[in-house]
Amino acid sequence: MSRVDKEPWWRGAVIYQVYPRSFADANGDGVGDLAGISERLPYLRGLGVDALWFSPWYPSPMADAGYDVADYRDIDPMFGTIEEADRLIRDAHAHEMRVVIDIVPNHCSDAHPWFREALAAGPGSPQRERFWFRPGRGREGELPPTDLGSIFGGPAWTRVTEPDGRPGEWYLHLFAAQQPDFNWNSTEVRAEFLDVLRFWLDHGVDGIRIDSAAVLVKDLDLAGETAYTDLDGVHEIYREWRSLADGYPGDRVLIGELWLPDHQRFAAYLRPDELHAAFNFEFLCCPWEADRLRAAIDESMLAHQPVEAPASWVLSNHDVTRPVSRFGRADSAFSFADRLRRQGLPLDLELGARRARAGALLCLALPGAAYLYQGEELGLWEVEDIPRPLLQDPMYHRSGGADPGRDGCRVPIPWSGVEPPFGFSPPGAAAAPWLPQPPAWKDLTVEAQTGDPHSMLELYRSALRIRSAEPALGDGTLRWLDSPAGVLAFVRDPGFICVVNVSGEAVPLPPHESVLLTSKPLDGSALPPDTAAWLRQ
């Protein structure tokens, strides 16, 4: 029995995010698919992760990479079939890995049957009550109902053409225009999503990752982000979801995507009758500075303690700059607002990789669960030179090109060989990968790194193997040690020490019995800059 089987599995699990479009392409069309994922399950099991989280795999026009869902109970044909999804879930379980899927409850696709019915039914219809339709301002209704802006740039309202051909009402979309927001005041919407949860839980998934979890409830009389961010009514929704999930066997888990700066408000979602866990974005966005990292860790731990929820730690995902690139710049924090400015700054990939290696050991040593994004274990960098005609992210298009978007972290990962598609697609594939891979990734393929004791991949394999075996790691607490300036050092009982040198000078290791793992070789008996060590106390 593994360590995570001795407690609710999600409290200390390592969860690997699979972005299906970019993981593995079995049929040669240039897009990843479920068959490709199935073929790579032995790799994931060998890596040592406890669970897989799949980004949306539903039928979708792909206006926002699948986060514009047209049918919540099926699989997009580009990925496969519902039968293949069932086999993938069973096969993952056979490899002793749980399965988490994405649910997108704030909005759907404008191709969703409900939205098409709403357009056809006209103003005042029950079908439109499922969404946020409103008359416009101005003499002819030519102005949006409010000044609310879209998170993706531009206005958050789009005007429709009514069935009689006249310009009509406006509908709300916090994201792209192709993603109309559901009205969660509607009992039909609430009942529909409870049924969607039942559908996938009945299909055997172990958890649900909830996209944009804090923005479901709106008050359009308020201004700006206060109109939709973290309104109290959202908690009633998650209490209903928690009651449903708790009725299933096997510790089914609800995980929220919550971008909230207020720690108390964040913790409210993790009360015992709401969500089980939530992503720790403060840690993800933190610069490579010892004081800032320690503050983010302390504040996160303190926020989780009152509700007895485990913290979660993450360095990257499908929305943010990859760590090797982020840590390789002088300004190593992450924010969506500053992404364009930072892309133009000098980049030291060697420095970024060294810091990313140390960051991985820090992340995996902290109390709670850890999330890995595909390719993180390979040390992939952000691809910042994708030809503009190939960019697909609506954040790029809606900003008029001012925001580079998120495609740079979504490039298909390299498996083998010395030139693209690096084993992502089968030999002789008819189509190139949907986003181009850098030729320099030939040194970062799974094949090239396997067996190389100095590679990022083997570092992750070693770290995950130790984490799984160490009773001190996973869920629990930590105790800080006195350490020099610029150094993080803490104890995980029983008998485990993590030290991370964020300073510019080599530092002595604290007293210890033996060295379990280091992110880079020691400098004699000292820990070099931008290096982490796991020690036996």
Image: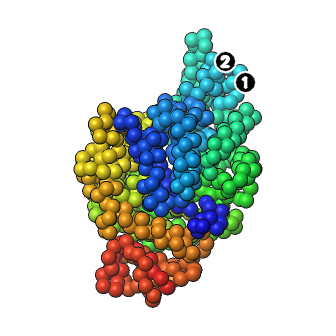
**Left or right, residue 334 beside residue 233:** left
Nearer to the camera, 330 or 110: 110
Q: Is residue 266 above or below residue 227?
A: below
Residue sitting at x 41%, y 81%:
515
Nearer to the camera, 65 or 462: 462
Q: Is residue 4 above or below residue 442?
A: below
**Left or right, residue 490 beside residue 185:** left
User: Which residue carries the number 2 mark?
Assistant: 121
Q: Is residue 41 above or below residue 103?
A: below
Question: Helix, strand or loop at disc 2?
Answer: helix
Total numbered labels: 2
Q: Is residue 307 above or below residue 274?
A: below
Residue sitting at x 56%, y 30%:
70
User: Which residue carries the number 1 mark?
Assistant: 126
Q: Quadrant of residue 289?
A: bottom left
Q: Quadrant of residue 305?
A: bottom right
Q: CA distance from mark 1 to mark 2?
A: 8 Å
Image coords of residue 432 (percent x, y): 31, 36
**Left or right, residue 428 beside residue 173:** left
Nearer to the camera, 5 or 142: 5
